[in-house]
Amino acid sequence: MRPGERPERRESGRTLDAVPLFASLSPDSRARLAAACSWHRFNAHETIIDQADEGRDVYFVVSGKVRVVVYSLSGRELSFSDLGPGGCFGELAAIDGRPRSAAVVALADTMVAGLSGSQFLQVVSETPPLAVAMLTHLAGLVRRSTERIVDLSTLAANNRVHAEVLRLAGLERRGNEAVIRPIPTHSEIAGRVSTTRETVARVFGDLGRMGLVERRSDRLVIRDFARLQAMVTEVRGDG
């Protein structure tokens, strides 16, 4: 058992129905797959998998939220992405057999379902719609990574902060507003967009004065998603 992991308990009602990757499977097939999974609970801030770990299991977030992070040789932590219910991680190691490319940490009390890499590859190879869904998922990873590389190479620091806030807001958008929870620290955003905490603080101050962002006790509210999106689109030249 990993540090922080709660003992597995056989509970009724465990399901993978909310995992988009398995949407093409029949209810019976999803139920059989869920029965083949190991189910684990983790406390907030506990590590689920370590970077460079040799494990091959693929994990699916059933409840809670996790963060994918990469550590540099100097020990600097770089946040890559946050995953909520339905998200999956560990698939790259299962596919290419290499060590984990990143660590994954629980941001809140979290339950994950783990499937062995061999079982995962078997069900993907035997189910063409699932294989297409997996390819679509991997294509999304490549596109998001490419977008971040282009932003880092072409945008000024303040615009990179805008783009990162927009990305986070897009995950929790409700109409023209979005709620980001938990609130990312200035250090976390600075690490993601390769700038300083001071720059992030200044940009957040500017966004607040513009009425675009409102910081509350436990959340960051994006008041005008469309306006923030237009600002990022303009500097990227996407319009």
Image (tube, rainbow, N blue to C red):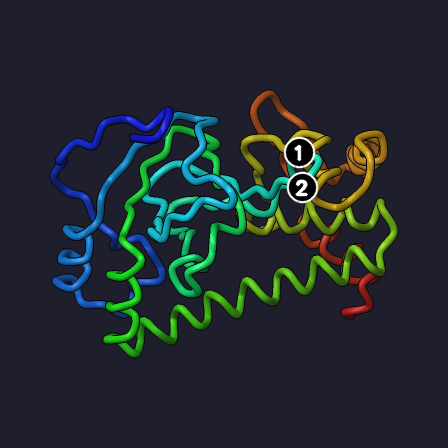
Q: Position of residue 151 (x, y in %)?
A: 77, 58
Residue at horizontal 82 percent and vertical 50 percent from the top: 159
Instruction: Place residue 238 in its image quadrant.
Output: bottom right
Q: Position of residue 15 (x, y in %)?
A: 21, 49
Residue 235 placement, left or right of 62: right
Give residue 75's mark: 1
Closer-to-camera residue (227/154): 154
Q: CA distance from mark 1 to mark 2?
A: 5 Å
Give residue 90's mark: none
Q: Secondary structure at mark 2?
A: loop
Crowding at label 2, few (<14), some or many (≥20) Cα neighbours within 10 Å? few
Going by the numbered disc 2, the residue's amino acid type is Ser
Location of the N terminus (image quadrant): top left
43 vs 161: above or below: above
Residue 194 placement, left or right of 132: right
Location of the C terminus (image quadrant): bottom right
Instruction: Place residue 148 in its image quadrant.
Output: bottom right
Q: Position of residue 43 (x, y in %)?
A: 38, 25
Total labels: the figure holds 2
Give residue 72's mark: 2
**Are the residues at dot 1 and dot 2 in contact (C-beta closer than 8 Å)?**
yes
**Going by the picture, which residue comes out furthest to the top?**
217
Closer-to-camera residue (40/71): 71
Residue at horizontal 15 percent and vertical 56 percent from the top: 31
Residue 191 placement, left or right of 28: right
Going by the numbered disc 1, the residue's amino acid type is Gly
Residue at horizontal 14 percent and vertical 35 percent from the top: 11
